[in-house]
Image (tube, helix red, strand yellow):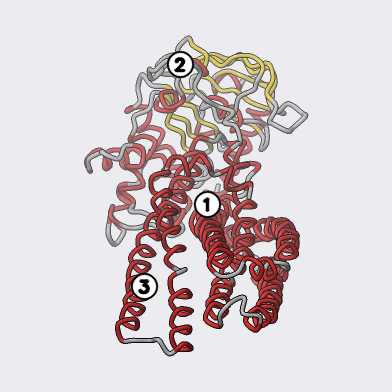
Amino acid sequence: MRVFLDLMWFFKQEKKAYLIGILMLLLVALLQLVPPKVIGIFVDHVKDQTLTWNNLFQLLGALIGAAVLMYALRYYWRIMIFGSAVKLSKLLRNKLYHHFTTMSQSFYQKKRVGDLMAHATNDLQAIQQTAGAGVLTLVDSLATGGFVIIAMAATISWKLTLISLIPMPLMAILTSWYGTMLHKRFHKAQEAFSALNDKTQESVTGIKVIKTFGQENEDIEDFRKQSEDVVKKNISVARVDSLFDPTISIIVGISFFLSIAFGAKFVLNNEMTIGELVSFTTYLGLLIWPMLAFGWLFNIVERGRASNDRVTSLLSEKVDIYDLPNALEVVPSGDVEFNLSKFTYPEDKKPLLKDIHFTLKRGETLGVVGRTGAGKTTLLKLLIREFEGYEGSIMFAGNPLSHYQIDKLREAIGYVPQDHFLFSATIAENIAFTKPLADIEEIYAAARLANIHDDILLFTDGYETVVGERGVSLSGGQKQRISIARALLMQPEVLILDDSLSAVDAKTEEAILSALRQEREGKTTIITAHRLSAIQHANLIIVLDNGKIVQRGTHEQLMCENGWYKEMYLQQQLEELVEQGG
């Protein structure tokens, strides 16, 4: 029952609704005592031949009155208790979503998307069940069981009541044992569901790759195995769950046998009437629900406890990048200065960046080049504070990055990543993502700068064309340019293009870069690229190799050196010449 203590913060928050709901449950439990008593009185009247029309109407009136009141009370306690449980689910879902949006990139490197989705769906549903059906079952079973036992002992026979309750300790021991097993197995079942959820999400996202390489059958087989594992673990849960009802039914049967056997003896000895024995067995019938409810309660509670542990563990993950007290609430504008001694990714041992030192004046363009894996993207992610924990300093407008509020820092930076994510919305909405209140002319202007405006006009619905999820209906170059337009719309102080021109041809690339030079005069631009023509106009070019700066200078200066830059540039020029038929 620990989960109820874990959720006590919510019960206190919604104490009025829960108290009213519980009060109504208690009244229903009391009203349930009326029908068995009325039936016993009726049987004694029939036996003694003292039943009159007046007595009959009184007994019927008591039954109807109790039924009407129970109907009304049951309607309202559902609103109070189940309604509050829905609020808990909503509150936890909002907490989770907020938690997801505040976590840094390292969090998503450790967590799988499918697992996070399972936390926000299956686990929350189990917790909601605990706060709704769990509370109902706990209160209703205790109240109904308690009131029935008191009524049996106080109004009929305390001896027969004790005899009928002899098997109950055995039920308590067995259900507790079942509950422990259920908790362990349900935890594993939820983990298996998370894995299947992640597999499904991954397969749907990568369906183009799967089909391109003809791996459909292998993927289906992999899914089948994981699905079987989910079924296997849930059957394991069901095997324990299925023990509750038979165990309780056997114990209830033993209680009925003892009650009728000893009750008949009491009737023969004139210790109780036949009507009282009928009332007693009817009361005992009312105990069947509380007993079965205890089994159901253990099921709900153990599922809820396992899910609550998973959600609590997720929410306890600390945000490793956060605003410092008294952080500057201004959008930075000025020079960018790197004095980085060393940076190592969390859980890695080998530093990825070492001895990175350079200054980029406001309004200048920086080109970052190097082999794949040299650390170009990592350098940019440090600038937008996706990662911290480096030795040295990164200054923006004379202040360390950590001195600015995160949202203000990122308001100054327009970042176009290598992975161009587009939402399943219209093209206009995708471009306006960074500035939702932008008018259509601003959207047009950003699209023209990114050299995508004419392409969009050729689409069936123009800017109102709905792209598929992640932009699957667009070409790689179109997605890149829409992403660039989205970043340009916010008119950032620093524009970062992380290999964002790789899918466009040389002519389009030159048109975009020329437009940027004209429109972004006085603003800083950082470009990483494999095609060196994208950065040859830069004020400063740095060449990274194994996380270190091995060359630096302008295009002209680097072409005068016999190094990686000159070798790669000449090679690319030769390749371009060959492609043109030279």
Q: Nearer the viewer, mark 3 or mark 1?
A: 3
Q: Is residue 402 visible?
A: yes
Frontmost residue, 466 versus 404: 404
Q: Nearer the viewer, mark 2 or mark 3?
A: 3
Q: Position of residue 54 (x, y in %)?
A: 30, 82
Look at mark 2 in the image and give the residue it sits on: 327
Q: Is residue 111 left or right of residue 467?
A: right
The disc at residue 151 is none
- First in sequence: mark 2 or mark 3? 3
The disc at residue 120 is 1
Q: What is the C-alpha distance between the residues marked 2 and 1? A: 32 Å
Look at mark 3 in the image and give the residue it sits on: 67
Name the kind of residue labelled 2 in the image.
Ala
Q: Residues within 10 Å of mark 2 (few under 14, many from 20)?
A: some
- First in sequence: mark 2 or mark 1? 1
Identify the secondary structure beneath mark 3: helix
Q: Quadrant of residue 412?
A: top left
Q: Nearer the viewer, mark 2 or mark 1?
A: 1
